[in-house]
């Protein structure tokens, strides 16, 4: 019997920092300019430096988006800060294949995962280092950084899932994570 070679992983995720490295890892950046219309206080957003980086995402997608056959993962590095009283946050989305779930694992920082079901019922979970969050099917998800350090978390989802941002652009979430009396709160957002 001849021994076959045991090869090193082609991609690594640093458990301390969340940094993904290796063949096929891509990176994207979202600035305040790209989040026009997402925050409650659009005037406050427009008055800030539009090149302010809100978050970076490093992704490892073994299959292209929308093609089945793999589990994807991505690390999001979400900066601390606020637009008015609303904490810096990701855009948020539903999945295009609505029955596909997701999982979030927090690496560092302090955040809130906002989950909105198809009836627009919103709830939220605290994200802390090591916390694991199941995003059920048909549930829009967005993350807000309520701390003073970058919030780093890793997301896992099936490659065939796809992302649908349109509904959130059109109607937003029914609750927003805002600083009220010095503390984070999930505040219901009246429909426009
Ligand atoms: C993947 C996923 C995350 C987000 C990332 C950025 O399905 O939910 O990797 O894509 O946190 O947030 P969005 O995509 O909402 O700008
Ligand atoms: Zn997702």
Image (spheres, rainbow, N blue to C red):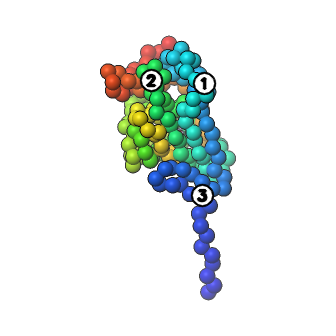
Q: Residue at x 49, y 50 (%)?
A: 17
Residue at image mark 1: 50
- The number of discs equals 3
Residue 141, x across and y down, in percent = 49, 34
Q: Which numbered circle lies on residue 11?
A: 3
Label 3–label 2 contact, CB within 8 A: no
Residue 142, x across and y down, in percent = 49, 33
Q: Residue at x 55, y 21 (%)?
A: 48
Residue 22, x across and y down, in percent = 63, 56
Q: Tell whether 163 sits left or right of 125.
A: right
Answer with mark 3 or mark 2, whichever residue precedes in sequence: 3
Q: Residues within 10 Å of mark 3 (few under 14, many from 20)?
A: few
Answer with mark 1 or mark 2, whichever residue precedes in sequence: 1
Q: Which numbered circle lies on residue 86?
A: 2
Q: Residue at x 40, y 35 (%)?
A: 147
Q: Residue at x 50, y 35 (%)?
A: 79
Q: Tell whether 63 sits left or right of 153.
A: right
Work out how far the residue at label 1 is from the one at label 2, CA to CA, in angstroms.
16 Å
Q: Is residue 173 visible?
A: yes
Answer with mark 1 or mark 3, whichever residue precedes in sequence: 3
Label 1–label 2 contact, CB within 8 A: no
> Quadrant location of residue 47?
top right
Residue with the most extreme front position:
49
Work out how far the residue at label 1 is from the one at label 3, CA to CA, in angstroms.
33 Å
- Between circles 1 and 2, the one closer to the viewer is 1
Is label 1 in a helix, a strand or a loop?
Answer: loop
Query: In the image, is the residue at mark 3 within 8 Å of ligand 1 by its beta carbon?
Result: no
Question: In what quadrant of the picture does the N terminus appear?
Answer: bottom right
> Quadrant location of residue 30?
top right
């Amino acid at each position: 019997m001849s021994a076959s070679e045991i090869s090193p992983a082609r991609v690594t995720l640093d458990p301390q920092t969340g940094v993904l490295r290796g063949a096929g890892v891509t990176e994207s950046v979202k600035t305040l300019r790209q989040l026009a219309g997402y925050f409650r206080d659009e005037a406050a957003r427009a008055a800030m430096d539009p090149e302010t980086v809100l978050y970076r995402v490093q992704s490892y997608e073994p299959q292209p988006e929308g093609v089945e056959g793999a589990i994807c993962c991505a690390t999001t590095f979400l900066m601390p800060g606020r637009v008015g009283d609303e904490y810096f946050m990701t855009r948020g989305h539903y999945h295009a294949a609505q029955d596909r779930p997701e999982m979030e694992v927090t690496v560092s920082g302090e955040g809130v995962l906002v989950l909105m079901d198809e009836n627009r019922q919103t709830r939220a979970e605290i994200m802390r280092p090591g916390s694991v969050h199941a995003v059920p099917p048909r549930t829009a998800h967005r993350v807000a950084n309520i701390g003073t350090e970058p919030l780093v978390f890793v997301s896992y989802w099936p490659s065939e899932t796809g992302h649908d941002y349109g509904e959130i652009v059109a109607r937003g979430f029914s609750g927003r994570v805002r600083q009220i009396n010095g503390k984070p709160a999930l505040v219901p957002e009246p429909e426009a």
